[in-house]
Image (tube, rainbow, N blue to C red):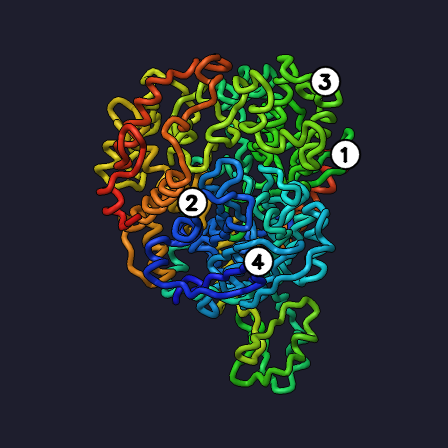
């Protein structure tokens, strides 16, 4: 069985940022982008919106630098998880994350990140453009290849 | 307090003082939010008869209740003041991301009083506000000023004026970021008269709902409801441009200052295909699941390289139909209006008025200083700039059509406005409906956005029922699904005869839109069609923890409407003012001349339905008592 991944199609996002409101609501019981695991990078002037979330690295740098082993890769779901009870709030993981995904909750003094809602991500259910999908890796890759292939054909005038 | 930020920010520019008002739960429940807060504050605190461009005026930004949640389309903020155009209740609504930031900064509303000694801007950051020197911004267009503010203050959303507001052009707008705005009723001039260039806001505080699971569930339910509307897919693809061709076909697209029927090539100019020609991406406001905005790029011609959020029906009607500009130029016009910070409806309309006066020989080429004609984009843009800078005839036109008409003998016949506010596209001579009556009964004057049948039919345009009714044109299933109290629905819609009672539906539609503008959700047709007071009452309850019924919500919306009406009456609104422009009764254009007597008849029916006096349109005492208003 292929592992499921959060697959983001950057061209589909229209910047509604519903995912941020949903994520903070589900995980923190309140609505604010600042406590959302997924974040939408928006440039209003040039109009682009890019959702950034965890890449679920196989060898997560955040886990690698954590001095208290509070971050673990869950081999079953593929998620990378922070254990709040162990986190000492040193922010080394925030520094180490290559994508700017690892966030920090100042009021609680702990790092926080996407844990795939335990295997059934809520943001995906609300993403009406299907910019965020939770699908098997091979399907995600096929879909990406297909788009690239179609672009090649379009550019060379075949279709 | 759940759901609300719980505080209102007050800034007094004359005294250089910032204060905070606590939001009382009873006040919140009675006025909901957004326009409701604005109406309550202005009715209570603004003395009658003040000069709208003096320090006595107040400007209120009211964030809708649902803003700062994932509830679909919850993005909207209402701005209100006494209007320099109408001298009555001025108000305008906009989405994008400003409201989310203002609420995230800890405030449900921002109340601005007084007048600064020199140009200033207000900076709000997570509960703290400062009045700062704006000399580096003054004179800059809106886009330049946003760039400067964003580079100075990390992560802010900006509401601001361009040069039009600084120069007190009466129909100046407040821009909401680069591409959105509170366009109508001249609120930018009010801001300019206060020497307030901008409000820059950043907030990272959370909205705390009473019932987390309930909010999650109702957000999902309403996403699905909106998607189930037949209007949904067309709106995700073409946005408001869906209406351009039908309204052209109806002969209801105001063309050449409303002097004629639609242009012969209107469908080529403004059909859905133009969206595909110019745009490949959509743009959403906060939490929206429609994303009706189009990211537009002009790829050839003299405006080549221009990129902007556009192809919305309002600029297309105002500059494409009313002035006859081609689509490249319409997109340029949108850019100019956004940068100058000027209402593109009134701007297009007042320039169309000038073109017609020139054609009719009421003004001369010398008065203008250059040739000016329908479709002449360069001259139109020159005149737009002259208006913004108040140069030459631009100084007169900057006062708006109604006041400008007083300067030229015989011009009144061509002045297209209601109560001093210019009318956007829809021409009641081509189509008579709930929507067109709503222009007449609109609190803010000549405008189409405060009353619309939630299930309006664009397939038919039959006026066989005279002025009292329009065709319904939907199935029994659509009727059953419409969220309206059963007895009222039966009075508003006659399924057997396939008709809608315009007076009854108008009142419902106005109150419903008022409710939307209070709760901060969008009036796009798929939302209006599917989201009614029953589901909104549940949404309000899960968010705030205050149990409320659909009836109580609609009563609040009606209360707000009546407060605004009382505001207008206090400012001297006369029943005789509630009238279409003269030429609508005298010329046919794309349809039929309007019948004044029959319209008066519908109006009186509407007054009756509202519980207002039939002859004067004043709310009756028992109506006000029912609504808990004691003037």
Alpha carbon separation for disc pair 3 and 4: 44 Å
Residue marked by disc 3: B365
What mark, if any, has residue B154 been given in the picture? none
Other-residue count near label 1 (Cα within 10 Å), few / some / many at <14 / 14–19 / ≥20 = few
Q: Please say whether residue B121 is visible from this viewpoint.
A: yes
Vertical side of A19 occupied by B558: above or below? above
What's the chain of the residue with tag 4? Answer: B
Which circle, 1 or 4, is nearer the viewer?
Answer: 4
Residue marked by disc 2: B48
Badge 3 and badge 1 in a common chain: yes
Q: Earlier in the sequence, mark 1 or mark 2?
A: 2
B463 lies left or right of B180: left
| The image quarter in which residue B505 lies | top left
Residue in the image at 67% along x and 63% along y: B154
Q: Please say whether residue B530 is visible from this viewpoint.
A: no
For the residues bearing labels 1 and 4, Cβ distance under 8 angstroms = no
Residue in the image at 72% along x and 34% along y: B298
Alpha carbon separation for disc pair 3 and 1: 30 Å
Q: Earlier in the sequence, mark 3 or mark 4?
A: 4
Q: Farthest residue to the bottom: give it.
A: A68
Q: Earlier in the sequence, mark 4 or mark 2?
A: 4
Nearer to the camera, B309 or A70: B309
Alpha carbon separation for disc pair 2 and 3: 41 Å
- Give the SS element for disc 1: loop
B489 lies left or right of A42: left
Quadrant of the drawing holding the N terminus of chain B = bottom left
Residue marked by disc 1: B304
Residue marked by disc 4: B14
- Give the SS element for disc 4: loop
Which circle, 3 or 4, is nearer the viewer?
Answer: 4
| The image quarter in which residue A134 lies | bottom right
């Amino acid at each position: 069985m292929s592992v499921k991944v959060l697959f983001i199609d950057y061209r589909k996002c229209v910047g509604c940022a519903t995912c941020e409101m949903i994520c903070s609501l589900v995980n923190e019981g309140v609505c604010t982008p600042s406590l959302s695991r997924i974040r939408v990078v928006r440039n209003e002037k040039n109009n682009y919106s890019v959702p950034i979330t965890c890449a679920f690295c196989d060898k997560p740098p955040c886990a690698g630098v954590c001095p208290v082993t509070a971050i673990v890769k869950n081999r079953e779901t593929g998620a990378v998880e922070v254990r709040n009870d162990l986190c000492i709030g040193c922010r080394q993981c925030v520094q180490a994350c290559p994508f700017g995904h690892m966030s920090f909750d100042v009021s609680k003094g702990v790092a926080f990140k996407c844990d795939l809602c335990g295997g059934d991500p809520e943001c995906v259910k609300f993403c009406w453009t299907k910019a965020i999908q939770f699908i098997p890796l091979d399907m995600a890759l096929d879909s990406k290849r297909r788009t690239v292939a179609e672009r090649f054909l379009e550019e060379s005038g075949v279709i | 307090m759940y759901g609300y930020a719980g505080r209102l920010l007050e800034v007094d520019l004359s005294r250089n003082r910032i204060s905070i008002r606590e939001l009382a739960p009873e006040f919140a429940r009675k006025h909901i939010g957004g326009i409701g807060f604005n109406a309550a504050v202005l009715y209570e605190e603004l003395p009658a008869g003040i000069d709208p461009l003096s320090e006595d005026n107040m400007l209120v930004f009211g964030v809708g209740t649902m803003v700062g949640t994932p509830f679909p389309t919850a993005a909207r903020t209402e701005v209100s003041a006494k209007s320099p155009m109408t001298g009555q209740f001025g108000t305008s609504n906009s989405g994008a991301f400003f409201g989310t930031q203002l609420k995230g900064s800890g405030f449900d509303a921002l109340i601005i009083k007084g007048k600064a000694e020199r140009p200033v801007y207000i900076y709000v950051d997570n509960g703290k506000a400062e009045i700062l020197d704006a000399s580096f911004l003054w004179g800059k267009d809106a886009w330049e000023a946003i760039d400067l503010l964003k580079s100075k203050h990390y992560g802010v959303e900006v509401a601001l004026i361009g040069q039009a507001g600084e120069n007190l052009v009466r129909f100046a707008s407040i821009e909401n970021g680069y591409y959105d705005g509170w366009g109508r009723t001249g609120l930018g001039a009010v801001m300019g008269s206060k020497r307030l260039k901008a409000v820059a806001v950043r907030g990272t505080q959370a909205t705390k709902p009473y019932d987390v699971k309930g909010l999650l569930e109702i957000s999902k339910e309403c996403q699905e409801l909106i998607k189930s509307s037949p209007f949904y897919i067309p709106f995700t693809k073409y946005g408001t441009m869906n209406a351009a061709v039908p309204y052209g076909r109806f002969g209801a697209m105001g063309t050449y200052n409303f002097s004629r029927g639609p242009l012969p090539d209107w469908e080529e100019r403004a059909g859905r295909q133009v969206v595909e020609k110019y745009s490949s991406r959509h743009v959403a406001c906060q939490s929206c699941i429609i994303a009706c905005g189009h990211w537009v790029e002009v790829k050839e011609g003299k405006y080549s390289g221009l990129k902007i959020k556009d192809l919305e029906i309002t600029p297309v009607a105002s500059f494409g139909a009313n002035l006859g500009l081609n689509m490249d130029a319409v997109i340029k016009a949108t850019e100019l209006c956004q940068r100058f910070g000027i209402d593109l409806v009134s701007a297009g309309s007042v320039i169309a008025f000038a073109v017609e006066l020139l054609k009719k020989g009421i003004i001369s080429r010398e008065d203008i200083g250059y040739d000016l004609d329908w479709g002449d984009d360069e001259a139109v843009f020159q005149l737009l700039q002259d208006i913004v800078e108040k140069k030459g005839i631009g100084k007169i036109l900057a006062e708006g059509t109604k006041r400008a008409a007083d300067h030229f003998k015989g011009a009144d016949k061509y002045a297209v406005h209601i109560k001093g506010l210019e009318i956007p596209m829809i021409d009641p001579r081509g189509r008579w409906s709930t929507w067109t009556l709503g222009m007449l009964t609109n609190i803010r004057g000549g405008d189409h956005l405060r009353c619309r049948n939630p299930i309006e039919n664009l397939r038919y345009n039959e006026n066989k029922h005279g002025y009292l009714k329009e065709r319904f044109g939907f199935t029994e299933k659509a009727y059953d699904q419409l969220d309206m109290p059963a007895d009222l629905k039966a009075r508003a819609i006659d399924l057997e005869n396939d008709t809608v009672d315009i007076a009854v539906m108008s009142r419902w539609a106005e109150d419903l839109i008022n409710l939307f503008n209070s709760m901060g959700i969008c009036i796009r047709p798929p939302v209006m069609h599917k989201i009614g007071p029953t589901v909104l009452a549940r949404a309000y309850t899960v968010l705030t923890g205050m149990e409320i019924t659909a009836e109580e919500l609609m009563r609040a919306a009606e209360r707000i409407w009546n407060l605004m009406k009382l505001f207008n009456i206090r400012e001297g609104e006369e029943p005789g003012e509630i009238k279409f422009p003269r030429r609508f009764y005298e010329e046919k254009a794309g349809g039929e001349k309007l019948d004044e007597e029959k319209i008066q008849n519908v109006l009186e029916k509407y007054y009756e339905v509202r519980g207002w006096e039939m002859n004067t349109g004043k709310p009756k005492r028992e109506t006000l008592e029912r609504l808990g208003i004691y003037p």
